Image: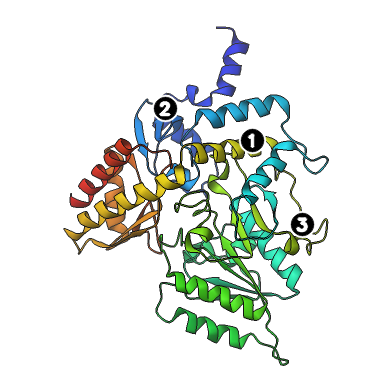
Amino acid sequence: MNPAAAHTDAALHPASTMATNAAGMARYDDAMAGVLPGYFDIVADHGEGIWLFDVEGNRYLDLTAGIAVATTGHCHPRVVAAVEAQARRLLHTSVVTRNAPAVALAERIGARTPFLDQPQVFFCNSGAEAVEGGLKLARRVTGRPGIVAFEGAFHGRTLGATSVTTAKQHYREGYGPLVPEVLIAPYGNVPDALEALDALLDARTDAEDRSTIACMLVEPVLGEGGYVVPPVAWLEGLRQRCDRLGALLIFDEVQCGVGRTGRFFAAERFGVRPDVVLFAKGIASGLPLGGLVASRALLEQWPVGAHGSTFGGNPVSCAAGLATIEVIDEEHLCDRAERLGEIGIGRLRAAGAADPRLVREVRGIGLMIGIELASGDDAARVQQRCFAEGVLVLNCGPHGEVLRLCPALTITDAEWDHGLRVLTAALAD
């Protein structure tokens, strides 16, 4: 082979130079910073639909979707075609010019927020950046410093996002002092959560009886904190308190958005109106893209140049986002998520009833399902048992005790059945 051609092939397909997972992992450990954690010691070579293939040719049923990112599965033909076509036309503009895919995608996303008046979109690259933008927006338009976040939340790894993240204590350790004026209130699954919130709010009223709270930032379904679905009445209570205080209610739908709960946004599923919705993860089926959507009246209070992003609204990522929404609509993936979620929760609850000492609770909404086990060790054991059978399952929760299922919304009935059979067998093992 021509040496130049071999070099080009290795650059385009680096996995081709890693014959085994062990060799790839050794190179990874040498080249990559160890701060980034990983679940499974394999090197992915390619993906097809719900399946991942490693460099040794082993196939895995992926019930993780790259942590709820691959909404339409790995390398959906429609998404790949859109990416390839856009890559031949335009890769990047930043704010030097506008680009057509970003405008079209903003229109599509706005059309999925019937709870907002004249919605507009700001694009960035990730969920953490979306959180940062939402917090900056709230402080700028209200002129107040106070931010209310909730126990068990995960909002990202940047300093501001870390300041409102409490899913695990080690996410915050060693990074102080964090952003000030952040209050942490109980999440909605805790008894008397609204009463505890009121006590915090009362303590943040100034001498002239004015609130210092700019916003409440909440995951309408808790993600990293354990896949917890709160009572709708609690979310309604947050809305009522924000209205009373003149604060913004911000829904972090980075993990639960884009069809996963059975509606495009969970806000619509729960019937509670936020002022701002944050999105990322599943919006572009694997390409980096995030953002926020809010009413025009609110966003017009954010002065030009008060916030920005070099790569936000990248035309290739936005082309992938447009294709993702087309697939969601044409393949009726929101309805599919709701139906398969009901099947999965029912089967897992039946399996858990056989061993209540191991399975404490099965909960979820749509294709966002959590199985809380007695301990993190139990979850790790079941996870590795599934891995040995070729099924990838993640864990989450304060102590890693919750197994979470967040597969691509395109998973077939047969694939879902196979994954549930492997998981229930692992729970019984």
Q: Is residue 298 above or below residue 208?
A: above
Per the rendering, the mark at residue 55 is: 2
Q: Of the two numbered discs 1 and 3 on the same chain, state the one appearing first in sequence.
A: 3
Residue 49 placement (x, y as % from top left): 43, 32
Q: Residue at x 42, y 27 (%)?
A: 55
Circles 2 and 1: CB atoms closer than 8 Å: no
- The image's colouring method is rainbow
- Circle 1 — which element? helix
- Circle 3 — which element? loop
Residue 425 placement (x, y as % from top left): 20, 46
Query: Disc 3 marks which amino acid?
Result: His
- Circle 2 — which element? loop
Q: Residue furthest top?
A: 1
Residue at mark 1: 319
Nearest to the eye among marks 1 and 3: give it: 1
Check disc 1: other Cα within 10 Å, few if <14, some if 14-19, many if 20+: many
Q: Is residue 260 left or right of residue 292?
A: left
Residue at mark 3: 307
Residue 415 placement (x, y as % from top left): 32, 37
Image quadrant where residue 212 sits:
bottom right
Q: Is residue 46 above or below residue 175?
A: above
Residue 150 placement (x, y as % from top left): 52, 71
